[in-house]
């Protein structure tokens, strides 16, 4: 399916809904952020907003205190309960729900960085673990109206993840080590523990 096809599917399924929440899940490096941002652009103007699960990352200082900084991005390094509460507020169509955004360049979550109004019909949520069928993430699937999983060959995932670290100024050896020690195990966890999605997208 093309991006336009996916957007059309969302509109068709959510035409009668006051609020329609879409989950875009997949391993790190699969292209979730790119696809989600594009879908928001393609959906009716002014009626779509993006929610990043990465905005619920623990702060680096907290990760240091927990001894989990090296595994940042693993399932237990997110405020999953905070994400669940936010999704419930969005499902209830509360007005002016303030949400965080993850700044990839700074590698930090920025609290209170965006706002989703009750007039927004389509909320596109993107994150690695949205469909994971293990606590505490398994509370989230029931909150989505449409789910999709992005699937990418493992070799391509590794190439993208190494390239990501290279773009952040790491040398190749360090970039490969970061990808293999953290990102790829997280990717494997997503593949092994996620529920079936309504739509499977190959990228």
Image (spheres, grey):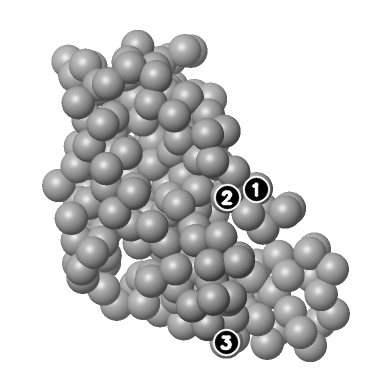
Q: Position of residue 48 (x, y in %)?
A: 42, 22
Question: How many angstroms separate mark 3 from mark 1 (CA)?
Answer: 22 Å
Question: How many angstroms separate mark 3 from mark 2 (CA)?
Answer: 22 Å
Query: Which residue is rendered at x = 50% and y = 61% of the image?
Result: 58
Does 25 sit above or below residue 152?
Answer: above
Relative horizontal placement of residue 159, taking residue 26 as reference (left or right): right
| Residue tagged 2 | 109
- Which label is found at residue 87? none
Front residue (pair 48, 67): 67
- Which label is found at residue 103? 1
Does 142 sit above or below residue 80?
Answer: above
Q: Helix, strand or loop at disc 2?
A: strand
Q: Quadrant of the N terminus?
A: top left
| Residue tagged 3 | 181
Does 83 sit above or below residue 95?
Answer: below
Can residue 29 be seen in this snapshot? Answer: no
Tell me if label 1 and label 2 are in contact, CB under 8 Å.
yes
């Amino acid at each position: 399916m093309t991006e336009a096809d996916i957007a059309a599917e969302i509109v068709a399924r959510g035409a009668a809904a006051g609020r329609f929440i879409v989950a875009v899940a997949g391993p790190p490096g699969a292209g979730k952020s790119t696809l989600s941002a594009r879908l928001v652009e393609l959906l009716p103007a002014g009626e779509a907003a993006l929610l990043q699960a990465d905005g619920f990352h623990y702060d680096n200082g907290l990760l240091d205190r927990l001894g989990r900084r090296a595994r940042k991005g693993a399932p237990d390094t997110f405020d999953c309960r905070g994400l669940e509460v936010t999704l419930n507020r969005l499902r209830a169509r509360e007005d002016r729900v303030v949400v965080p955004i993850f700044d990839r360049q700074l590698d930090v979550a920025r609290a209170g960085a965006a706002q989703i109004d009750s007039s927004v019909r389509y909320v596109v949520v993107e994150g690695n673990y949205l469909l994971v069928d293990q606590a505490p993430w398994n509370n989230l699937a029931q909150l989505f109206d449409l789910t999709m999983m992005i699937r990418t060959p493992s070799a391509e995932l590794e190439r993208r993840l190494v390239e990501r670290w290279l773009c952040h100024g790491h040398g190749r050896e360090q970039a490969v080590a970061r990808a293999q020690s953290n990102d790829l195990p997280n990717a494997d966890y997503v593949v092994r523990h996620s529920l079936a999605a309504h739509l499977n997208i190959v990228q």
